[in-house]
Image (spheres, rainbow, N blue to C red):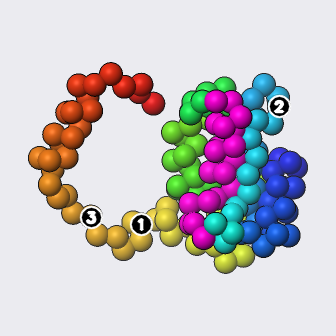
Amino acid sequence: MLEAIEEAKKGILSKEGGPFGAVVVKDGKIVGRGHNEVIKEQDPTCHGEVMAIHDACHHLGTFDLSGCDIYTTSYPCPMCLGAIMWANIGHVYYACNTIDAERIGFRDKQFYESQHGLVFRELERTEGQKLFAEYQKGDHEMY
């Protein structure tokens, strides 16, 4: 966890984003590091956990991080939680919770409670189903 905190400090000092850092660990060794780079990259998806997952996947040469754990400075937001699950990471260790993040001005809590006023409408389902059927006919590696 201390390595995740150090990673977050790098991002704070360089003014790249918030106090969020993460490391991915496999067999007791750090295989990926990342910190929040939302401001640096002007990209709202560049959270610490996502950046650490990108780094781990790059270093391990795989999109499947089964057998890995992630250590993060804050309880993962829904986007990061989704990325962690898609990567098949087994354990999540966090230092601060959602209340702690809210106290310093981050709005993660609202994303757990609602769909943030988004409007969802299904469009062109038949065409979408044709696309999915075309994909299913091919020989693809499933992830």
Whole-number angstrom distance, CA of label 3 to CA of label 2? 42 Å
Under mark 3, the amino acid is Phe
Give the residue at the far left of this rendering.
126
Q: Is residue 48 magenta?
A: yes
**Residue segment shown in magenta:** 42-61
Q: Which residue is mark 1?
A: 114
Percent x, y for residue 135?
A: 27, 32
Label 2 element class = strand
Q: Is residue 29 depicted above or below 16 in this figure?
A: above
| Residue linked to disc 3 | 120
Quadrant into which the C terminus falls: top left
Disc 3 is placed on an element classified as loop
- Which residue sits at x=82%, y=69%? 14
Residue located 14% across and 47% down the image:
127
Which label lies toward us, 3 or 2? 2
Image x and y of residue 28, in percent: 82, 29
Q: Which mark is residue 38?
A: none
Kind of residue indicated by mark 1: Ser
Residue 96 seen in the figure: no
- Residue bearing the label numbered 2: 29
**Residue 4 location, x and y as percent?**
81, 51
Overall secondary structure of the magenta section: helix
